[in-house]
Amino acid sequence: MHEDPRSTSPHLTHQEQLLLDIVAESADPVGARIATRRLADSGVSLSEASTSRLLARLDELGLTASSGRKGRTVTGAGRRLARFNRRTLRQANGLHQALDIQDARQLLDLLYARRSAEREAARWAALRATPADVTRLEELLIEHRRALDAGGNARLCGMRFHREIFRVSRNRILQAIGDVVLDESLAPLELVLDVITGGHGTFAQSQPEHLDVLEAVRTGDPDVAERTMLAHVNRLIEEAERAAADRGADVVKRLLELTL
């Protein structure tokens, strides 16, 4: 298995990344003249001398190799990095579109995705939590309780608990999903949920539900951990669905517009 390009490759400038892509995608060696022309097609205007210097740097980094007067070809390391960069850009663009929550249906879709991921994360957390992990979860719940009693930022405390469950799962795939569905850019959506649950009189209900999850993690019971997390997220979904139905999707959409 190849090493992760993120851990073994240097940071490239935008121009260097474009140039690496040009060489990697070419079936034939690429010289400075051709590379300069293709860079221009991508909106980057450089002299051939500047392009030659960039190619020399890619050579020094072991990402390209000289083929004499024919130009450069990509090395194995260069091909892996170019592939990784393209995949990262594609994923970033896809996530940006997916997380652009504009209406009630999209908010519910996010909660549905969270339900699938969080129930599994809770299960693995129960199987893999250390005593130190349990202590950290306890501390977060104490902070949450204090925030509720003192009128502090209970929403932030609640999100920290959810993020910690993903971390404790020690499942890299689940952690990556958690980074997406609990991204800080989505924090305003939690405010919308606060308004919804506040209207239903259930704003403070999350803290004791989190305590149920903690107890299952503490005792190492994956079935109960999954079941309690599922019940918690299901309640949020049901309340969001009820809000969209009772007050109308337009009201929820207006809330999203005010917070995002």
Image: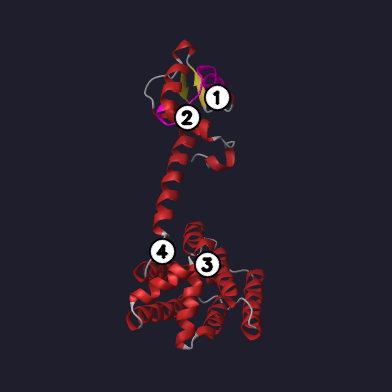
Visible in this render: residue 228?
A: no
Q: Residue at x 38, y 81 (%)?
A: 243
Give the residue type at disc 3.
Answer: Ala
Q: Is residue 43 magenta?
A: yes
For marks 4 and 2, the one nearer the N-term is 2
Relative to 85, is 163 on the left or the right?
right
CA gap, disc 3 and disc 4: 12 Å
Q: Please tell me the numbered disc located at residue 44.
A: 2
Q: Please tell me the numbered disc located at residue 54.
A: 1
**Magenta highlight range:** 41-57
For marks 1 and 2, the one nearer the N-term is 2
CA gap, disc 4 and disc 1: 40 Å
Counting the numbered discs, the total is 4
Q: Please tell me the numbered disc located at residue 215.
A: none
Q: Secondary structure at mark 2?
A: loop
Give the residue type at disc 2.
Answer: Val
CA gap, disc 1 and disc 2: 13 Å
Q: Which residue is mark 3?
A: 187
Q: Secondary structure at mark 4?
A: loop
For marks 3 and 2, the one nearer the N-term is 2
For marks 3 and 4, the one nearer the N-term is 4
Camera-side mark, 3 or 2? 2
CA gap, disc 3 and disc 2: 37 Å
